[in-house]
Amino acid sequence: MSKKRVAIIGAGPSGLAQLRAFEAAKKQGLEVPEVVCFEKQSNWGGMWNFSWRTGVGKYGEPAHGSMYKYLWSNGPKECLEFSDYSFDEHFKKPISSYPPRPVLFDYIQGRIKKNNVRDYIRFNTTVRWINYNEDTKKFKIVLDNLKIDKTYSEEFDYLVVASGHFSTPNMPYFTGIEEFTGQVMHAHDFRGADPYKDQNLLIIGSSYSAEDIGVQCHKHGAKSVTLSYRSKPIGVNWPEGITEVPLLKYFKGDTAFFKDGTSQKFDAVIMCTGYQHKFPFLPDELRLKTKNNLYPDHLYKGIFFNDTPNLIYLGMQDQYYTFNMFDAQAWVARDFIMDRYKIPTKAERRLDINKWLVENERLKSSHDHVDFQTAYIKELLALSDYPGFDVDKVAEMFKEWLKDKDENILTYRDKTFKSVVTGTMAETHHTEWMDELDDSKERYLFEDQKEKALEEKEPV
Amino acid sequence: MSKKRVAIIGAGPSGLAQLRAFEAAKKQGLEVPEVVCFEKQSNWGGMWNFSWRTGVGKYGEPAHGSMYKYLWSNGPKECLEFSDYSFDEHFKKPISSYPPRPVLFDYIQGRIKKNNVRDYIRFNTTVRWINYNEDTKKFKIVLDNLKIDKTYSEEFDYLVVASGHFSTPNMPYFTGIEEFTGQVMHAHDFRGADPYKDQNLLIIGSSYSAEDIGVQCHKHGAKSVTLSYRSKPIGVNWPEGITEVPLLKYFKGDTAFFKDGTSQKFDAVIMCTGYQHKFPFLPDELRLKTKNNLYPDHLYKGIFFNDTPNLIYLGMQDQYYTFNMFDAQAWVARDFIMDRYKIPTKAERRLDINKWLVENERLKSSHDHVDFQTAYIKELLALSDYPGFDVDKVAEMFKEWLKDKDENILTYRDKTFKSVVTGTMAETHHTEWMDELDDSKERYLFEDQKEKALEEKEPV
């Protein structure tokens, strides 16, 4: 019998976790299936592979990346550390708890560069369409090699969808927006705060993007930042220069009118109005249809599509846990594919899903959300040999992080946390976050040494 | 035998021309095939259906529209008039030669509203994938009803691809662009000049988009407009405030460095660097692979895909002629589908295509280009009963238009031309183009009457 074939869509953190999971099994001497990963972009990293492009990429495919310049981790790195590849192992020295994007991208790459996973990835290859044959239980995947403009198809026994859910903007309409005189864009197309210097900026939304883009634009010199929320304000202690107002009702010319009767002129609008779970390459009966939430329906253990469990979705949850959750998921998926982990009947799986859905409905506070996802991670960890870590300790860190942000949204990134993988305490960074306008890896990792070297050279 | 089925992709000017062609045959009492038109957007008009959205549409599909506010026809309307539906018939009075977008959109809609073509169009429906069966000679089309998130497939005997080729940006990379501090966008995402007021704007490109966006931004108050060309400048008489420079070499911070050694700081960059012919829904052996040019290879009579002539492409040429060319093409396509027009063998078709390709290679001046496309239109008109018009006269108008633009890029839109369909001379518009900042239909069509009424009311 020929080897089973596994297709992975996307070489971002989730897809790479899946590749890493198979590599780990191989190192244990196990026979692993044939794995092929399809990546639309020309490099791995998914969201972490920054691109200056917006709209479409080089080959005219919808741009994947929503990352921007000056993006620093908005949660402690100790909450996302790979338990099989620590920050210490990668950086050889303690670093701060909130590194900028290039530093985290470096970390993600470190683990996979140690293994030869690049060989499994077909870059510049997009998935056009997938058919599932109920009789043969095989997925026929139509692929498009963008670089040579050539389509072809291949069959697979398992399909792992790791294409993310922060790439397809959700953009509500507001009356008069077509006549608004300033720039209008979705956060997906935001590439950094520089163009908003000295501008009055309206941000629509009250989730992470709104908070982070708002604070970045404030830091980099926007004249004012106004955040408009639909149901609930973010409600942290905003500094002067950032205000929260209720929902936008309509635009007239350059002016926005809000639900509370106030109005203001703006130079630009950024819609931080979320993303759609979008799988245009799948027939609708195989599509995960969900809003962004902590436990999307139809996924057993958060990953197995209940109607067709050899279709696996990774990382489709709203996320507190990120890299370590993708790992825990990928290890379970691997064991299922390798027949080392059995799933129960469809009806039993449905009951298990329902249990989580009911629980999810009950959640009220952010602490409840953290605890809920913590319980989910614990369940996953019990199912595979992915190295365990002190999940309760991570949950505590999340709660401390929530408190820190609440107290001071401008300084929470100066705090430090202790690794649950190595026990290492993070360093206090050489520069306070509000004063650090350079997000390069060089500046972040080596600037203190340069400064020290300079000090030593200087005559007293 | 059941009726033949025809699928049309896109309800823009080309797709609508195809629907109109079948309606015209039906009015003559002929039996027409079953026609279904699939349109991704929620309304018809294609490019002429203005949307404030950029990036993706409401349902997360790549945005089709490249139109912007304050867009006025950049060629005389007398060069694109439908020969079966005149401007006189639609507006009931003479109008100027260069109307704004909403007025032209109104005109396009007028002809199709007269017929019940809306019933043939499935809106909010995108084509995901197409298979062609060599044995049955049928196209199996996978469709996605975006509104209800439901996929399905249907079979057709003919496929008319009318999805346009000005929607998928071509964006070259320039060293340092990822660090450029201002906004970077492609013309596809440009939605009007307002955000560039008082800014120093860099436009990369030397074709229609560059010329038109540059002039609009100048008109609406940009501090300076710099156009950077690759091989040849546009070379018209630029007014103060617009300059042309050679190719951009690289960016450093907010500064662009050009091939001639000069450099300048800019607030924003708009890439008017063209579009890709992109058909992601077709297997590559059915895809038209071409750069933008007056006679794309592989299309017999400019429309029949030579390998598979029941696959028809409309409007894929670089365009002097537009609406009337799409009509002439659609009428020929209709007659082929209805067995009223026969095409020769594949080898003979190849010879005919080659003849045009050789001719196209020889062209040097803009006048040569006009004459070449004029000859093509004449050939098309001879093949169907689409009402003939004086094509040589239209060619003369194109040449006059080229001269007008050359002489004064800011006033050429104030010129008037005579209709070859009705003989009507265009009106001089009530306001000179440079003074007209309002592009609404109401202002364009009725403002002179309002002003006259006001004058009459005013006491002397």
Image: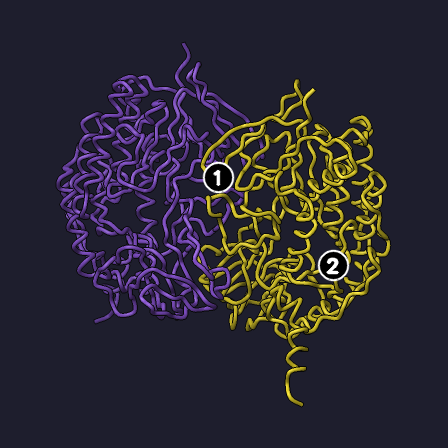
Chain colours: A yellow, B purple
Please determine whether, in this image, residue A212 is positioned above or below residue B135.
below
**Residue wearing tag 1:** A146
Q: Amino acid at mark 1?
A: Leu
User: In the rendered view, does B171 fall on the left or right side of A235?
Assistant: left
Viewer-side residue, A206 vs B350: B350
Q: Amino acid at mark 2?
A: Lys
Asked which secondary structure carries label 1, the reply is loop
Instruction: Give the percent coordinates (x, y) of residue B128.
Output: 51, 32
**Residue wearing tag 2:** A77
Please determine whether, in this image, residue B140 is positioned above or below residue A428.
above
Which picture quadrant has residue A186? Answer: bottom right
Examine the rendering and report whether any part of residue A355 can be seen.
yes
| Label 1 and label 2 in one chain | yes
Instruction: Give the percent coordinates (x, y) of residue B209.
Output: 33, 53
Instruction: Give the percent coordinates (x, y) of residue A291.
Output: 67, 44
Where's the N terminus of chain B, which quadrant?
top left
Asked which secondary structure carries label 2, the reply is helix
Disc 1, disc 2: CB below 8 Å?
no
Instruction: Give the percent coordinates (x, y) of residue A447.
Output: 64, 72
Say which chain tag 1 marks: A
Residue at x 78% of width, y 35% of height? A29
Badge 1 or badge 2: first in the primary sequence: 2
Residue A360 badge = none
Viewer-side residue, A434 vs B245: B245
Where's the C terminus of chain B, which quadrant?
bottom left
